[in-house]
Every structure is written in C-alpha cells, then in structure tokens.
C-alpha cells in the first residue's frame, strides 16, 4: 500500500488516469484503490480535487468510448477477448449475449 501512495504522490494525475482507463477498458485493475489513495493525497494537499475529478472522469470516458468504438467494429470477437479476462468466461458471454438479444443493437 505504501508503494501505491508514493506512486500517487509523485505521479498522481497520470496514475489515476491510467488506472481508471485500464479498468474502463476491462482490465482487472482496482481503480477504487487508486481513487482512495488519490483522495488521501488530496486531503494531504499533494493533489487538487477538481483536477483529480476531471482526470478520473476523462479516463473513464476515454476507456468507455474506446470500448464502444471497438465493439462497433469487432463485435463478438472483442466480447470473447474481454470475457477471457473475467473470472467465469462462460457466464460472461452468456449474460452478454442474453442482454444483446433482449435489447438489440444500438
């Protein structure tokens, strides 16, 4: 935990952006821990709260937009790759397929 705090103290905004972006694109990275550590850095005065919020939201939006665009072009292949990263790939694919068939393409 000390390593995460020192990393955020030195490279706070970049670390938060990369971690939130990584979680938004489906990698198993705990963004909540990075955000908690960044909140501690804000409380200590090392980071600015408005800038941190902007960086975190931008990381999430970039990741979600990237997955949306890739999903439009790659479809089921992307879903298969993302579900390989999950704990239970079969359940991931079945739930996603059920959701797609229920709601249809957007």
Image (cartoon, helix red, strand yellow):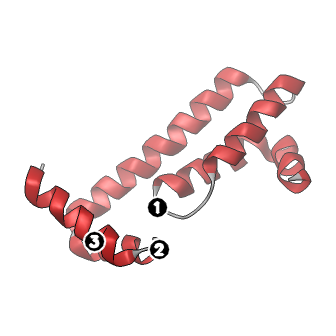
Label 1 packing within 10 angstroms: few (<14), some (14-19), many (20+): some
Q: Position of residue 83 (x, y in %)?
A: 38, 72
Residue 72 vertical position relative to residue 9 in the rendered view, above or below: below
| Location of mark 1 (residue) | 26
Q: Position of residue 71 (x, y in %)?
A: 26, 62
Q: CA distance from mark 3 to mark 2?
A: 11 Å
Give the residue at x 47% y 74%: 85
Q: Position of residue 88 (x, y in %)?
A: 42, 74
Quarter of the image where one finds residue 38: top right
Quarter of the image where one finds residue 97: bottom left
User: Would residue 22 be found to the left or right of residue 2 on screen?
Assistant: left
| Location of mark 2 (residue) | 85
Q: Which numbered dot is residue 93? A: 3
User: Would residue 18 be found to the left or right of residue 93 on screen?
Assistant: right
Q: Nearer the viewer, residue 18 or 37?
A: 37
Give the residue at x 32% y 77%: 90
Q: Position of residue 62 (x, y in %)?
A: 45, 46
Tag 1 near tag 2, CB within 8 Å: yes
Q: Is residue 45 visible?
A: no
Q: Which numbered dot is residue 92? A: none
Q: Which structural element holds mark 1?
A: loop
């Amino acid at each position: 935990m000390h390593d995460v705090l020192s990393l955020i103290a030195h490279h706070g905004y970049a670390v938060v952006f990369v971690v939130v972006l990584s979680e938004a694109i489906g990698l198993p990275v705990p963004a909540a821990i990075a955000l908690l550590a960044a909140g501690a850095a804000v409380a200590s005065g090392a980071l600015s709260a408005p800038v941190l919020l902007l960086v975190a939201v931008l990381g999430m939006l970039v990741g979600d937009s990237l997955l949306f665009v890739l999903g439009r072009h790659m479809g089921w292949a992307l879903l298969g790759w993302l579900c390989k990263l999950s704990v239970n790939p079969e359940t991931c694919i079945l739930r996603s397929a059920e959701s797609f068939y229920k709601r249809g393409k957007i």
